[in-house]
């Protein structure tokens, strides 16, 4: 009896915890669908890959999907823990000619306020986790 319980608990855990992996391995999801389902960072960087041209810089907050970026060397990311941009992050944005900005959805108002005087921001993508903006000088 304990062996049956252990086996069923293991199968249930695999089914619930790794559903995207099981669907991908069984051929029910494409690689793109798997990444969109299993990786909350992917959708905004996928859109970035569609619109960015060679040589354009991206500044990202809390999205570390460097490997999926169109040019990883021009993809700068930083992490925050308190929900507002730090002075250092805003300085970094002003220092270099970043063309794109990826921010968490809940950061929108604080980053827009900090940047609206210096840059025009056009929303290119929005999902439940991140926003992607194109930045142009005001």
Image: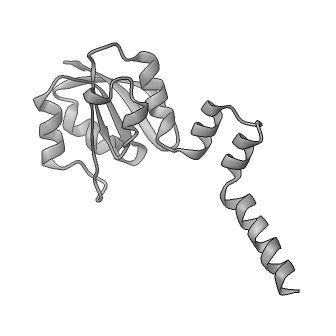
Horizontal and vertical percent position of residue 42: 49, 37
> Which corner quadrant holds the N terminus?
bottom right
Q: Residue furthest right?
A: 1
| Residue 62 horizontal side relative to residue 8, left or right | left
- Residue at 42% across, 24% down: 48
Q: Residue at x 39, y 29 (%)?
A: 69
Which is more toward the observer, 69 or 48?
A: 69
User: What residue appears at the point 17 percent right and 29 percent down from the top-left corner?
Assistant: 117
Position of 16 with respect to 110 (left or right) is right
Residue at image coords 16%, 26%: 118
Query: Is residue 37 or residue 107 the one in the foreground?
Result: 37
Colour scheme of the rendered structure: one colour
In the rendered view, tell whether residue 73 sits above or below residue 1: above
Q: Quadrant of residue 132?
A: top left
* The quarter of the displayed image where residue 119 is located: top left
In the rendered image, the quadrant that contains the C terminus is: top left
Total of numbered circles in the picture?
Answer: 0
Query: Residue 97: image x %, image y %?
Result: 17, 22
Residue 21 percent across, percent down from the top left: 67, 48
Q: Position of residue 55 (x, y in %)?
A: 26, 16
Quadrant in the rendering for residue 61: top left
């Amino acid at each position: 009896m304990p062996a049956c319980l252990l086996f069923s608990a293991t199968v249930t855990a695999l089914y619930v915890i790794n559903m995207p992996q099981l669907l991908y391995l069984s051929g029910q999801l494409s690689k793109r669908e798997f990444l969109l389902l299993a990786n909350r960072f992917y959708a905004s960087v996928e859109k970035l890959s569609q619109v960015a041209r060679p040589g354009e810089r991206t500044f990202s907050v809390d999205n570390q999907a460097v490997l999926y970026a169109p040019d990883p060397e021009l993809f700068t990311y930083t992490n925050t823990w308190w929900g507002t941009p730090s002075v250092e992050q805003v300085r970094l944005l002003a220092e270099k000619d970043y063309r794109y900005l990826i921010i968490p959805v809940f950061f929108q108002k604080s980053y827009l306020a900090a940047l609206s005087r210096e840059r025009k921001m056009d929303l290119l993508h929005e999902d439940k986790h991140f926003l992607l903006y194109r930045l142009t000088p005001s």
